[in-house]
Amino acid sequence: MTDRQFQILAILLAVIGVALIVLILLLLFGEGSEEAATTSTMASTTTAEPTTTSEATTTSSSTTSSTTSSTTTTSTSTTTTTTTIPPLALGADGIGGVKFGVPPDEAIEYATAFLGPPKDDSGWVDAFSKYGTCPAPEVRGVEWGGAEGWYGFALLFTKAETAHQPEGGEHFFSYYYLDGTDPEGLGTAEAIFIGSSLADLQSTYGADLEIFDDEIFGTTWFAERDFTAHRVLGGSMTGEERDDFVETINGGVGCGE
């Protein structure tokens, strides 16, 4: 081999060697980049997971707070109402849940539940008595309260014929309420009491109210007056001025003078 041929061969071998070295370096650096890229991607994914958990926790806390607030508001909504209507209401057809025509024992038991035991029971006496001239032949009065020797409230019973029962049947037919302090607080279903003014009566009963002077009983008021049906609600007053007031409350067709 000539010297020139030897030089050319040496140059070719040198070029091949350099090419091999470059190829090896490219392979080595290329694998490192891929691993770095893979590692970076995994780190990014791992970091995102705690962020998701934090968002879920914040949402749960907000919901719990809102629910608690709503429950507190609901629990404080309370309304209380009261009434001035008396429990033992005096009416044109009886007292409270007991109507004219019932047997004496039923009416007495009902009133006793509200007023306690009666002060006195006259038993069956002559129709002409302290209660007035009552339907013949006999009358019975059961009394509560009142001053010594008198009464504040009385239930009256008869054996005479009325709109409620035929003759001979003992029954409740009338009541008198004379003293607003003993027993205290009895009144009509419309909240008219002993001591209510004429103005109160007028505003309560309107055109149904009757006021007139009676030769025996003085100034008299009626909220209802149907003697045929024995439905009567009225009483006496101190006068006919607007500031005059109710003195008595009576129901049913009672006893005359």
Image (tube, rainbow, N blue to C red):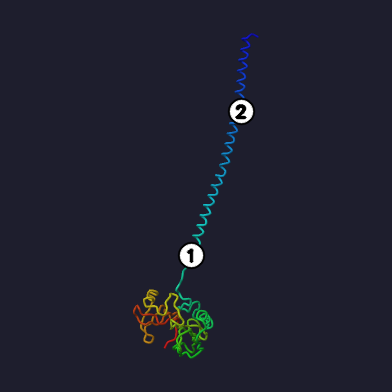
Relative depth, front residue between 49 and 24: 24
Position of residue 60 measured from the top left corner of the image (x, y, whole percent): 54, 51
Mark 2 secondary-structure assignment: helix
Q: Look at discs 1 and 2 and give the one toward the viewer.
A: 2
How many numbered discs? 2
Position of residue 140 measured from the top left corner of the image (x, y, whole percent): 50, 87
State the residue lying farthest toward the right.
Answer: 1
Label 1 belongs to which residue?
A: 78
- Residue sitting at x 37%, y 85%: 218
Position of residue 41 measured from the top left corner of the image (x, y, whole percent): 57, 37
Mark 1 secondary-structure assignment: loop
199 vs 43, left or right, is: left
- Residue sitting at x 36%, y 76%: 199
- Residue sitting at x 48%, y 76%: 87
State the residue lying farthest toward the left.
Answer: 241
- Residue sitting at x 53%, y 52%: 61
Label 2 belongs to which residue?
A: 28
Q: CA distance from mark 1 to mark 2?
A: 81 Å
Relative depth, front residue between 229 and 50: 50
Dot 1 amino acid type? Thr
Dot 2 amino acid type? Leu
